[in-house]
Amino acid sequence: MRCCYTKADRLLKRSEFLRLSIQGRKIQNRYFIAIFSPGQFQRIRLGVTVARKVGSAPIRNRIKRFSREYFRLNRHMITGYWDINIIAKKEAAELSSEQAYLSLEKIFKNISGSKEH
């Protein structure tokens, strides 16, 4: 099990996010939306999107940090190779780290239960 979150584990290009939004499947809960599709590489890659409407820069950065850290610690629980974009909803601004982890856990379990096509 790897314990780091490298550049190769990230969605970086706008085209990758656009491909996901067009081709990907969407699941959501109260705080987050996840758009995911089978990955093009032999790894799970994560992108995190937090719009300005969610809150100020420190709040947005905190949400991104929680999301990346949860992914870093729990990626081994996801089966298959996926490209995943986590989008924070406005309600995510008030989350504690524990609440964020519980919410993300439900989303990642849903993704793991999905079949690749």
Image (cartoon, grey):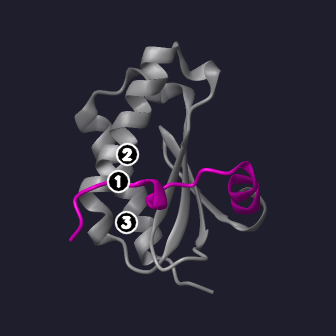
Determine whether label 1 and label 2 are within 8 Å by CB. yes
Q: Residue at x 41, y 73 (%)?
A: 112
Q: Quadrant of residue 80?
A: bottom left
Question: Viewed as shown, does residue 35 lie left or right of 44?
Answer: right
Q: Residue at x 44, y 26 (%)?
A: 61
Q: Position of residue 117 (x, y in %)?
A: 63, 87
Between discs 2 and 3, the one toward the N terminus = 2
* Range covered by the magenta-colored residues: 1-20
Residue furthest to the top in view is: 56
Most foreground residue, 79 or 99: 79
**In the rendered structure, which amino acid carries the disc numbered 3?**
Lys
**Disc 2, SS:** helix
Which residue in the protein does label 2 denote?
A: 68
Q: Residue at x 40, y 61 (%)?
A: 108
**In the rendered structure, which amino acid carries the disc numbered 1?**
Tyr
14 up-or-down from 40: above or below:
above
Which residue in the protein does label 1 denote?
A: 5
**Disc 1, SS:** loop
Q: Which numbered disc, 3 or 1, marks the residue closer to the eye? A: 1
Most foreground residue, 35 or 42: 42
Which residue in the protein does label 3 denote?
A: 109
Q: Which numbered disc, 2 or 3, marks the residue closer to the eye? A: 2
What is the distance, in whole Å, between disc 3 and disc 1 at their CAs?
20 Å
Q: Position of residue 5 (x, y in %)?
A: 34, 53
**In the rendered structure, which amino acid carries the disc numbered 2?**
Arg
What is the distance, in whole Å, between disc 1 and disc 2 at their CAs?
8 Å
